[in-house]
Image (cartoon, rainbow, N blue to C red):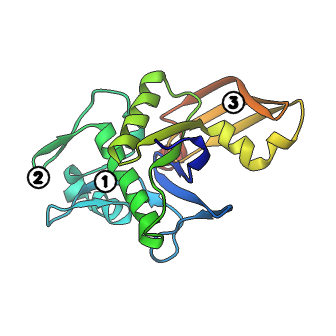
Amino acid sequence: MANQQNILIGIDLGTTNSSVAINNNDNIEIVKKPGGVEYTPSVFGFNEAKNKVVGQKAYEGFFRFADVKNYKPEVKRVIGTSETFHFERVDIKMGPEEISAEILKSLKEDVLRKYPNFNTAAAVITVPAAFSVLQSEATKRAGNLAGFKYVVLLQEPIAAAMAYGSLNIKNANWLIYDLGGGTFDVALVASKDRSLSILGHNGNNFLGGKDFDWDN
């Protein structure tokens, strides 16, 4: 079984956009889509040929308003619930975990397209600090459905603090604001003895950039 020492893939499974990075011989690389785009719209659906589509093509399909019943965006907001979505074109119902798994599969395929022999047995997936146990477990199951045998969840404020270099700063507290496309979280993170912990947090899964756009 994969273990923490050989997890080479990190994924930001976002409400509106997702991205994947790899550790390629100690070089951290964001895996880009064809055309050099560093992110994938978190949209899944079925096109006119009844094929599964993820990302930009699904995003464009969703915003053809006559076709909205065949595409689903922003599923992260309801992961961990029993809600299902009916895709009219293929007469199939899917839950948030299954849809999230399709997005994760697409990101994994991006890695394998560039590096066919890359180790994709395991992945780290970031989640909001405000995620409940049900939401976190559902995210793990989505990772397993996507083909990652071993999934580690990392709270997004901790990931941000690590990226900033907080592990190298002793005995300090950080207030981290995470304003994403669909969610808004605030966390108080403590750095002590090269260890990070969340002292407190609050968040709203329905208050992000997308909501600001609609309100305007």
Kind of residue indicated by mark 1: Phe
Residue located farthest toward the right when viewing the structure as drawn: 170
Q: Is residue 41 left or right of residue 155?
A: left
Residue 10 x %, y %: 55, 51
Secondary structure under tag 2 reads: loop
The residue shown at (52%, 48%) is 181
Residue 65 x %, y %: 25, 57
Residue 13 visible somewhere in the drawing? no
Using a 10 Å C-alpha cutoff, classify the residue at mark 1 as few (fewer than 14 neighbours), some (14 to 19) or many (20 or more).
many
First in residue order: circle 2 vs circle 1: 1
- Contact check, label 2 and label 3, Cβ < 8 Å: no
Residue 57 x %, y %: 32, 66
Secondary structure under tag 3 reads: strand
Residue 196 x %, y %: 75, 32
Label placed on residue 156: none
Q: Nearer the viewer, residue 211 or 37?
A: 37
Q: Which residue is mark 2?
A: 90
First in residue order: circle 2 vs circle 3: 2
Q: Is residue 63 left or right of residue 151?
A: left
Residue 133 visible somewhere in the drawing? yes
Kind of residue indicated by mark 2: Val
The residue shown at (77%, 32%) is 195
Label placed on residue 44: 1
Label placed on residue 187: 3
Residue located farthest toward the front when viewing the structure as drawn: 1
Using a 10 Å C-alpha cutoff, classify the residue at mark 2 as few (fewer than 14 neighbours), some (14 to 19) or many (20 or more).
some
Kind of residue indicated by mark 3: Ala
Q: Nearer the viewer, residue 104 or 77?
A: 104
115 in relation to 63, above or below: below
